[in-house]
Image (tube, grey):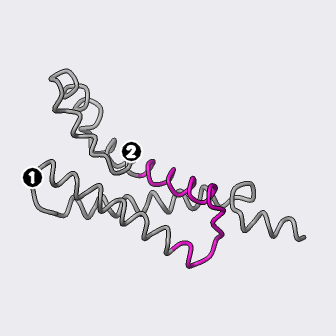
Amino acid sequence: MLIVFPLNFLRLFSPALRQAFDHVFDPEWVHIVGHLGLYAALVVLLRILFHLPAKPLTVALIAGVILILGGTQEYLQLIFKGRPFGPADLFDLQVDLAGGALGWLASSFPGIDPSLKRSARNS
C-alpha cells in the first residue's frame, strides 16, 4: 500500500509537515532512490513470499505488477497534482522498472532464489 499512496498528500495537513516533506523529498535524487528502493524491495518480497523462480514468465509477470502499481501510483499523484501525464511520469515508471530489476538481481542468490535452492538440493 505504501507504494501506491501519494506521500505528497501528507503536505496538506500542516505547514510543518509540508516543510519537512519538502526538505526530505524535494531533491530529485531522493525521489529516484525512493522509487528504486520501493520497487526493489517489492520484487525481493514477491520472490521470497511466493517462491517465484527465475523464468521468463516470472520476469514478465513481475514487470506487469510493477507497471500496474507504478501506473496506479502515478495516476493518484496526477489526480492530487491536477495535471496531465507527462515525461516525468514516464521517467518514474522507468525508474520503477529499474528498481524491479535491481530487486531481481538482489534476490538472485542461492540463499534467496527458489529456483537456485532446488538446483542446489538436487546436486
Farthest residue to the bottom: give it: 56
The local secondary structure at tag 2 comes to loop
Asked if marks 2 and 1 touch (Cβ < 8 Å), the reply is: no
Q: Amino acid at mark 1?
A: Gly
Can residue 67 be found in the magenta stretch?
Answer: no
**Tag 1 residue:** 82
Main structural element of the magenta stretch: helix, strand or loop? helix
Taking the spot 11% from the left edge, 61% from the top edge, the residue there is 84
Taking the spot 23% from the left edge, 38% from the top edge, the residue there is 26
Instruction: State the separation of the CA atoms marked 2 and 1.
Output: 21 Å
**Tag 2 residue:** 2
Label 2: how many Cα within 10 Å (few below 14, some 14–19, many 20+): few
Residue 112 drawn at (x, y percent): 69, 56
Taking the spot 45% from the left edge, 69% from the top edge, the residue there is 63
Q: Looking at the figure, which quarter contains the C terminus?
A: bottom right
Q: Is residue 37 above or below residue 53?
A: above
Query: Which quadrant would residue 91 be assigned to in this image?
Result: bottom left
Can residue 43 be found in the magenta stretch?
Answer: yes
Q: Amino acid at mark 2?
A: Leu
Along the horizontal axis of the image, is 104 left or right of 39? right
Counting residues from the start of the chain, the first of labels 2 and 1 encountered is: 2
**What segment is highlighted magenta in the picture?**
36-59
